[in-house]
Image (cartoon, rainbow, N blue to C red):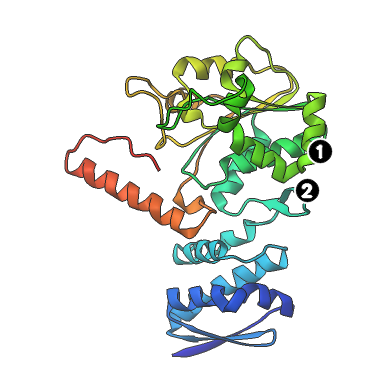
Amino acid sequence: MIEQTIQADRLEHVVNLFGSFDENMKIVEQALDVRVINRGAELKVSGEAEQVLKAVKAIEGLLLLSSRGEAVSEQNVRYVLGLVNEGGEDKIVDLARDVICVTAKGKPIKAKTLGQKKYVEAIGKNTVTVAVGPAGTGKTYLAVAMAVTAFRQKQVGRIILTRPAVEAGEKLGFLPGDLQNKVDPYLRPLYDALFDTLGGETYNKYLERGSIEVAPLAYMRGRTLDDSFIILDEAQNTSREQMKMFLTRLGTGSRVVINGDVTQIDLPRDKISGLKEAVRVLRNIEDIAICELTAKDVVRHVLVQRIIRAYEAYEEKLEGLGVKKRRIKR
């Protein structure tokens, strides 16, 4: 048994680190079988030598995030512990470094994982970015944040968000209202991200001016989209023809982000996903980035990570038994 002392710069960082009812520190203690006691801004970590060393690295990393304005949450703690266990504690310094933009409520939006950081950097460097990853990895939200930043900095003149209107196993053809009312439910995640980032009043103002457009993918046919930041969401539900049509809409001064989760394809079984094909076709094209996010990049409830990993393990088991893989929707 050994004991090591950590001296925090400010008491508020320690308060942020421990969390409500010390819930964050309890995760560290249980994961590494150590004991952490704080006296003001001083923390003492005791336990087996190897585990204490890991705990100290994790705590110092979390204090660093706190010093950069990051609210330490269960997700942060588990992600940092994962990095420390893999010997990647030196990468913690790269997290929460840059603010993408600030929401209408004053909340800074940052990449929370290394995968998200690479995704954001790819959007900034490339004309076309294709992101593939499971639910909860921030694909849509971060893309919208990058679009708003580019718009505010006058890098583009408008934001266009689109997605295919494909039903996720439910028949919605008898929804009331006109065409826009019928397609609005499909576009709701895009509306939510814009509302959170811009605020309702600003969003409506830009929408009326035509600076923001949210529309089904079918509305893109025949257009040339110049000076725009274009986001195609739920791209796994595009056909190969729709994906080619969308990619060829790219105009001068525009940037494109394509997002999707290839484990949640709602197309008929005889249809090839345009996203899966695009990843294969475009992988080595200059100025096009392919980003692959994983369960480690999930920033929703910790159970979402566990659910994703459970399905992955189940599908691997089926493949190992020689059972034909079926589509399993999460």
* Rendered position, 225 above or below 50: above
- Quadrant where the image shows the C terminus: top left
| Residue 155 in sight | no
* Rendered position, 91 above or below 44: above
| Residue 206 in sight | yes
- Quadrant where the image shows the N terminus: bottom left
Amino acid type, mark 1: Thr
Q: 287 or 178: which is nearer to us? A: 178
Q: Position of residue 211 (x, y in %)?
A: 78, 27
Mark 1 residue crowding within 10 angstroms, few (<14) / some (14–19) / many (20+): few
Q: Position of residue 174 (x, y in %)?
A: 50, 23
Look at the numbered discs 2 and 1 and tell me whether their residues touch, using CB distance below 8 Å. yes
Q: Is residue 288 left or right of residue 264?
A: right
* Rendered position, 188 above or below 239: below
Query: Which residue is rendered at x = 30% and y = 50% of the image?
Result: 313
Query: Which residue is rendered at x = 48% and y = 59% of the image?
Result: 302
Q: Position of residue 102 (x, y in %)?
A: 76, 49
Q: Dot 1: what SS?
A: helix
Please name the residue that numbered disc 1 is placed on.
202
Please name the residue that numbered disc 2 is placed on.
104
Q: 275 or 204: which is nearer to us? A: 204
Label count reads 2
Q: Residue furthest left?
A: 321
Amino acid type, mark 2: Ala
